[in-house]
């Protein structure tokens, strides 16, 4: 199991080990594979699993009770929810019962009966024997923005929520041991930490061949994944696709989107809010309050790597992808812009490296706040600060060496941000010039040069 999933497993285990009966909600993006987490949690424990369909309540009850009946449970077909719960408890034979319902929103959206009967069942029978109901959903927007209103008072029966987040880059690196470090970073810039997508890439092939096989080709499984995601979650996709296409090209301020799309500012604001609710987009904020006069405000960025890649490299060239062999399409439309695109995700990799140093006690201080500084005329990729004001600044250079001029530019941007770096971290996959190497040798506590060897072994 991935290291990052251990905290999620601990969350579930704490409730199980308490011996108390509870209802939990666990949710995350549809491309985050929750099966390993679920199977590890129920290992050697009595559990019943049901995957709810999009169906009427009558059909849902028929499907669920028939599944259990066919597995040998003591239940009649077309039972009530309470009768289904009773059969599950009987199956547990005196042991604690874990009842796991996947896609539970398919039941709850249509009827209150399920939650009414589940809450009553856990309240009454749960006093005699532990019942842990784990309700799983891949509809992030509904859980975070609609579920409580949908459930009303019944929401009070839910003991806790857990959002399962994408896994970090380091775990993709472990997953693809035979792939070069730079190729894994580029894979991460498309697949992110959405583990369900990882199975389509193979580390026997390099990055280019994986993209040609799995995203560009006629039979490529992931070619339409971004569109499937948007069409599944959004109405009026023509508007959303227009905004995403513009943002993928770097048009990321509301006023610029207004001028480029012709949509009203009010309309764009509403649609951006919806994209944020679905985790397609996020609003980027600059670190701290100082230097606000030099900050670029109101910057929106695409959060989902697969969506970002698609609208950057595939969507503008849909005609060409039909007419060309995959390799030719890659070389013409993807190759030239891929390094610039991957550089944004390299910043995530470097930030992760910083936090791993802190975990191991190898960072100069305990991090209280962290972020980035987005200036009108320059950025600082990583800003970390302790509660007492100690500050570290970081810049990330993908596919090129770092020079003394870059160091000078960082100090200039730091002055605009009104930040003083007690220590500077410079990351590069292609090394550092002689001036920086000498400066780091003379001041090892204040200037840290992190090259590809350190990143690979970090």
Image (spheres, rainbow, N blue to C red):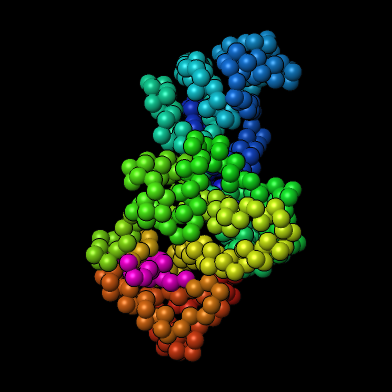
Residue 297 seen in this snapshot = yes
Q: Which of 69 and 281 is in front in this view?
A: 281
Q: Residue at x 45, y 75 (%)?
A: 426
Point 49% across, 90% down: residue: 434
Query: Overall secondary structure of the magenta stretch?
Result: strand
In this picture, residue 63 sits left or right of residue 6: right
Residue 141 picture location, percent across and down: 46, 37
Please name whichever residue, 9 or 313, is drawn nearer the observer in this view of the structure.
313
Question: What x and y, as percent, mark residue 182?
Answer: 61, 68
Is 278 placed left or right of 59 in the picture?
left
Horizontal side of residue 262 vs 68, given as left or right: left
Question: Can residue 3 be seen by looking at this rendering?
Answer: no
Residue under the image location 57 percent in, 42 percent down? 229
Work out which quarter of the rendered image holds the C terminus and state it: bottom right
Q: Is residue 457 above or below residue 58?
A: below
* Position above or below: 349 against 92: below
* In-front residue for pair 121/286: 286
As rendered, which of 415 and 157 lies closer to the eye? 415
Residue 69 is one of the magenta-drawn residues: no
Which segment did they paint magenta?
376-396
Position of residue 105 relative to residue 232, above or below, is: above
Q: Where is residue 47 in the image (x, y as percent from the top left)?
A: 63, 28
Residue plotted at (28% across, 74% down): 415
Image x and y of residue 438, in percent: 45, 89
Location of residue 267 (image quadrant): top left
Q: In this view, does 398 lie above or below 185?
A: below
Tell how many labels.
0
């Amino acid at each position: 199991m991935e290291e990052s999933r251990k905290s999620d497993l601990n969350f579930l285990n704490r409730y199980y080990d308490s011996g108390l009966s509870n209802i939990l909600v666990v949710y995350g993006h549809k491309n985050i594979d929750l099966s390993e987490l679920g199977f590890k949690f129920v290992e050697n424990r009595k559990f019943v699993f049901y995957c709810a369909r999009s169906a009427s309540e009558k059909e849902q009850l028929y499907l669920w009770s028939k599944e259990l009946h066919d597995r040998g449970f003591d239940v009649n077909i077309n039972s009530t929810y309470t009768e289904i719960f009773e059969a599950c408890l009987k199956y547990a034979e005196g042991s604690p019962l874990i009842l796991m319902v996947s896609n539970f929103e398919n039941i709850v959206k249509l009827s209150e009966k399920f939650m009414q009967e589940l809450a009553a069942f856990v309240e009454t029978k749960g006093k005699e024997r532990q019942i842990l109901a784990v309700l799983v959903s891949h509809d992030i927007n509904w859980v975070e923005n609609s579920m409580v209103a949908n459930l009303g008072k019944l929401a009070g029966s839910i003991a806790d929520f857990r959002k399962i987040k994408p896994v970090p880059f380091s775990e993709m690196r472990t997953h693809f041991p035979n792939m070069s470090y730079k190729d894994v970073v580029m894979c991460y810039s498309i697949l992110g930490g959405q583990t369900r997508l990882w199975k389509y890439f193979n580390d026997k092939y390099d990055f280019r061949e994986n993209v040609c096989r799995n995203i560009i080709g006629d039979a490529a499984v992931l070619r339409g994944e971004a569109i499937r995601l948007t069409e599944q979650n959004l109405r009026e996709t023509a508007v959303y696709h227009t905004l995403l296409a513009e943002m993928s090209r770097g048009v990321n301020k509301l006023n610029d989107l207004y001028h480029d799309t012709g949509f009203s500012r009010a309309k764009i604001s509403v649609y951006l809010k919806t994209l944020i609710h679905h985790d397609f987009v996020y609003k980027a904020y600059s670190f701290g309050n100082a230097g606000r006069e030099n900050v670029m405000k109101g910057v929106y960025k695409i959060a989902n790597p697969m969506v970002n890649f698609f609208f950057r490299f595939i969507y503008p060239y849909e005609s060409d992808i039909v007419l060309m062999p995959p390799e030719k399409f890659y070389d013409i439309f993807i190759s030239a812009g891929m390094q610039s695109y991957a550089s944004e995700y390299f910043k995530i990799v470097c930030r992760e490296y910083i936090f791993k140093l802190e975990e191991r006690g190898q960072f100069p201080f305990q991090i209280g706040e962290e972020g980035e500084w987005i200036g009108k005329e320059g950025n600082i990729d990583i800003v970390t600060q302790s509660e007492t004001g100690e500050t570290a600044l970081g810049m990330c250079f993908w596919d090129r060496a770092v020079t003394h001029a870059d160091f000078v530019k960082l100090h200039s941007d730091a002055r605009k941000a009104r930040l003083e770096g007690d220590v500077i971290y410079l990351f590069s996959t292609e090394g550092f010039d002689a001036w920086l190497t000498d400066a780091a040798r003379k001041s090892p506590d204040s200037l840290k040069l992190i090259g590809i060897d350190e990143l690979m072994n970090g």
